[in-house]
Amino acid sequence: MMRNTRSPLSRLPDETTEDARQSVIDEAFMQEALVQAQLAWDLGEVPVGSVVVKDGIVIGRGFNQPITSHDPTTHAEMVALRDAAKNIENYRLLDCVLYVTLEPCMMCVGALLHARVARVVFGAMEPKTGVCGSVMNLPNESRLNHHAAFVGGVLAAESGALLKAFFALRRQK
Ligand SMILES: [Zn+2]
C-alpha cells in the first residue's frame, strides 16, 4: 500500500487491522463533515454537516440550510449530494461514501438510495426524524431495490455535543 505522509493512515503501525484503518478514515472524513456543521451554525442553522468522498477525495460538501435558502430540502446530505453530482457531472454517485454528522431523515435516505451511494456513515442518532435505526430502519427494508451500507455512531459524541450546545444557546436567547 502506498503511504502518503499526510494521510492519517501513515501514523498507524503495520499490524493495524482493516477495520481499524477504516475507522481512522471514517473519523477523518467525519471531522470534515463537522467543519461543515460549524458553517451551518454560523448562519444560525441547526449544525449538521456532510461530505461526499470518492477514492479518498472529498468531491462534495454541504451543510444544513433550509431557513436561509428558503428550501425545506436543503439538509446537509442533499446539499453535499448535489455538490458532488455536479462536480463529477453524474447523477449517480457510484463508489461514493457520504458522511453526515446526524442520522439521516426519510428524504435524505431516499435521495442517497437514488444517488446509488455505496456507503453512508453518520454520527449522532436523531430520535425524532432519523430513519436509520431511530424512528424506523429504512436501510434494512429488503423491498427497496437498492442498498447502501449504513454505519452510525462515528464521532457521535462530537456531533451530538455541537447540536446540544446550539440548542442550549438558542434557548437562552
Ligand atoms: Zn434529511
Image (cartoon, rainbow, N blue to C red):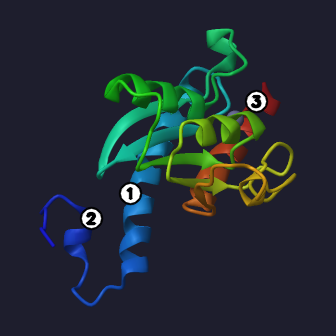
Q: Residue at x 19, y 71 (%)?
A: 10
Q: Which residue is tagged 2?
A: 8
Q: Distance between the residues labelled 1 and 3?
A: 29 Å
> Decide: marks 2, 1 in contact (CB < 8 A)?
yes
Q: Which residue is tagged 1?
A: 28
N-term mark: 3 or 2: 2
Along the viewing direction, whichever of 113 and 102 lies nearer the viewer: 113
Looking at the rendered image, the quarter that the N terminus falls into is bottom left
Q: Which residue is tagged 3?
A: 170
- Whole-percent x and y of residue 83? 43, 25
Instruction: Name the amino acid, label 1.
Output: Ala
Is 165 on the left or on the right of 57, as rendered? right
Observer-side mark, 1 or 3, equals 1
Q: In this view, does 39 lie above or below 24?
A: above
> Decide: marks 3, 2 in contact (CB < 8 A)?
no
N-term mark: 2 or 1: 2
Mark 2 nearby-residue class (10 Å; few <14, some 14–19, many ≥20)? some
Mark 1 nearby-residue class (10 Å; few <14, some 14–19, many ≥20)? some
Along the viewing direction, whichever of 141 and 2 lies nearer the viewer: 141
Is 2 on the left or on the right of 7, as rendered? left
The quadrant of the rendered image in which ligand 1 is seen is: top right
Residue found farthest to the bottom: 15
Q: Which residue is drawn at 63% across and 61% down?
A: 152
Q: How far apart are marks 2 and 1 (CA)?
A: 8 Å
